[in-house]
Image: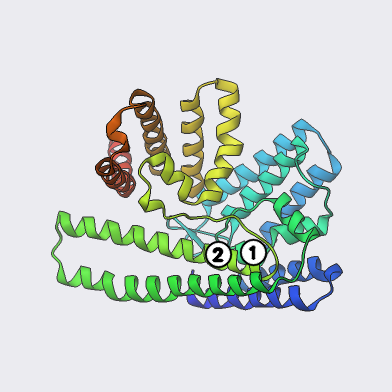
Amino acid sequence: MSESLLSLLIGWCAFASAAAWLVPKTWLTYALLAAGVGFLAMADIFSLALLAFGACVVLVVTRGFKGRYLATIAGVLLLATGYLAFIVTAPRGFGSGIASGVVLPLGMAFSTLRLIHVLIEHYKGGLRDHTAVEFLAYLLLPGSLPVGPIHRLDDFIRDLRRHRRDPSLLSSGLERVLYGMVKIVFICNYLLQQKIHPLLEVTAPATLLTDYLGLILSWCNLYIAFSGFSDIAIGTAAMTGFRLRENFDWPFLASDITQFWRRWHISLAHWCRDYVYAPVLAISRRPVMGVLAAMVVLGLWHEFSLRYLLWGVYHGLGIAAHRAFVQHTAGVAFRNHLWWNIVATLMTLHFVLFSFPVTKAVASWLSSL
């Protein structure tokens, strides 16, 4: 995301936060909706049009075909296939949001998952009663629009109904927003991209060591930037009186790959657990099938390609292998030692670091056959 777009996002988040403190509670939903619409209209009007279409699909299904299984399935398929078709056919340089080199409309990847979540939970009867305006305000909550977290509608409605002006939430939220901006503007854009990355390219010859350092640098950049935007979203929500789920919890300190996916992009991992892993497990009765399905969906969500299909399989097999290891070493003493935790953490870190180059190499080999 460019710095100009970041500035625009911060401006509209500030508007939403101020509105939460200044307008009467009966107007709060409309103020949040106006902030979201205003941000998307100025950032990328096509993104707003696509989001409006997706919202209409959900409203038609949930209001016009209440409790209908086939209508829910049709709505989910329409949203999912529409998203996949767009990431396959979208021209480069179009829109504002960037995922894996393919340029997408701003927030489309995250909004699609929110919309599918609402459809499924509505069919299951797991949502509080809400109005269409409340649903749209949830969908257009400004801070979470570009890159998540993928918050849940029921949590939003709960906070909206219990909304109060809390000075402690305001101060902690402002601190979180500033923390996220330091991550993005200073650490990522300045230190990593403008200083360290050019220095590595100029001073170091092309060796396995520089490739390894470049790999570490790219993951650091991804993590710090992504977690920085999550900080801004969580902080803005707190300033307006809403609580969003944490999205990162020091993932590179995880001692196994299962723990890594409980710490990395937590809201996405939970979405895949609830809407892919659980249904596949219920049908197949085989946890490994549920894990593989969830990780493949997670991979293809990033990019509909052979490389990301293999990337999902890579992580799914890693989780399955870890589960088998835990079952076969239950009660073994070495797993409680400090040295094992250190070794396991380093192994997990490198398993994650090498996920992209390994799967990219396999995809290139398969394509050449």
Quarter of the rendering occupied by the C terminus: top left
Foreground residue, 190 or 109?
A: 190
Residue 303 visible, this angle: no
Residue 252 appears in the rendering:
yes
* Residue at point 75%, 48% (across, down): 57
158 and 214: which is toward the camera: 158
Instruction: Give the mark nearer the N terminus: 2 vs 1.
Output: 1
The image quarter in which residue 337 lies: top left
How many residues crowd around disc 1 within 10 Å: few (fewer than 14), some, or many (20 or more)? some
- From this view, report whether residue 49 is shown above or below residue 187: above
Q: Quadrant of residue 367?
A: top left
**Disc 2: which residue:** 95
Q: Would you say the residues marked 2 and 1 are in contact, meaning their CB atoms lie under 8 Å apart?
A: yes
Query: Disc 1 marks which amino acid?
Result: Phe
62 over 252 or under it: above or below: above
Horizontal side of residue 242 vs 180, given as left or right: right
